[in-house]
Image (spheres, grey):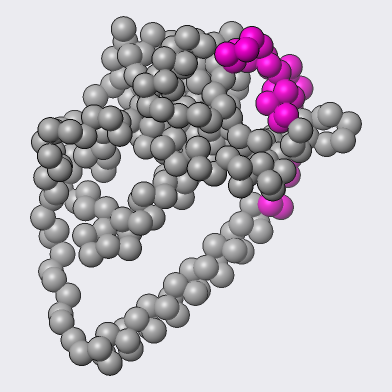
Amino acid sequence: MQPQMQESKTAHPKVVSEKEWLAARKELLTAEKEFDRQRDALSAKRREMPWVKVEKNYIFGEPSGKVSLSGLFRDKSQLIVYHFMLGPGWKEGCHGCSYVADHFDGMQPHLNARDVAFTAISRATRPEIAAFKKRMGWNFHWVSSNANDFNFDYNVSFTAKDRIDGKVYYNYGLREFPADEAQGLSVFCKNDAGEIFHTYSTYSRGLDILIGTYNYLDLLPKGRDEEGLSFSMSWLRHHDRYENYQLDPNATYQAPTTR
């Protein structure tokens, strides 16, 4: 059974001749090309960001044992880390992170061909990560930061002491956040001397570009069809939980449950 979609509140565009449609499409194309140029300029500015040398020797847990941050690069000089919201004792991973992660496996050989290693990192234990990864049918590399400060240092895990008037430091500012784990992405580079540098991190809506499904939905008449929902991703489920579900537009955010 397919989820019930929200009716669009946008009035149906007028129906025109092919000639009028083509004129409108060319006008939109001009705006799209300008957006492409702006995006290219922003990407260039991102590459000009200064770097910070990573001084800590982080050790992570992986299925085969332990691996250092340096080891996560394997034979590459660039590393992308996805901070996956799966905390110790959680029954399952975050819906939103799982939505993003559904796009990971197919890109791995392409990233590898461009001198890029990829890994997901969560504070859950190795067995917890392995169990959820098996359930979801994923193959990408995923390690545990349960025994180090990595998540805290990159502002995606929080303790009670981290909360100031109910707010935590996330996405470069103090803000309310409903869980003790958050999502994000960080980029690192390693030079020939083996030194590691943190070059970039993004959080919250900065991760939007990673979600290929959203990019496809943005092309459609209904778009993401999230207007009228209590929060934008309330329609979202793990990919193995869509059968026989009904969309409740009034459903509120539910914090992850523990085992």
Q: In terms of depth relative to the viewer, which is nearer, 45 or 84? A: 84
Asked whether residue 182 is in view, the answer is: no
Residue 116 in the image: above or below residue 216: above
| Residue name at image x 11 percent, y 36 percent | 246
Q: Nearer the viewer, residue 127 or 223?
A: 127
Which image quadrant: the N terminus?
top left
- Does residue 68 belong to the magenta stretch? yes
- Residue 75 position, x and y percent, is 76, 33
Q: Is residue 73 visible?
A: yes
Residue drawn 44% across the image and 72% down it = 32
Picture residue at 29% right of the left edge, 14% below the top? 257
At 13% across and 50% down in the image, what residue appears? 6
Could you tell whether 43 is left or right of 54 in the image?
left
Q: Is 207 rendered above or below residue 20? A: above
Residue 235 locus on image (x, y percent): 21, 39
Highlighted range, magenta: 47-74
Q: Quadrant of the C terminus?
A: top left
Q: Position of residue 110 (x, y in %)?
A: 61, 47
Does 256 sit left or right of 71 as displayed? left
Residue 236 in which image quadrant: top left
Magenta stretch encompasses residue 215: no
Residue 254 place in picture, x, y as percent: 24, 24
Q: Residue furthest right?
A: 193
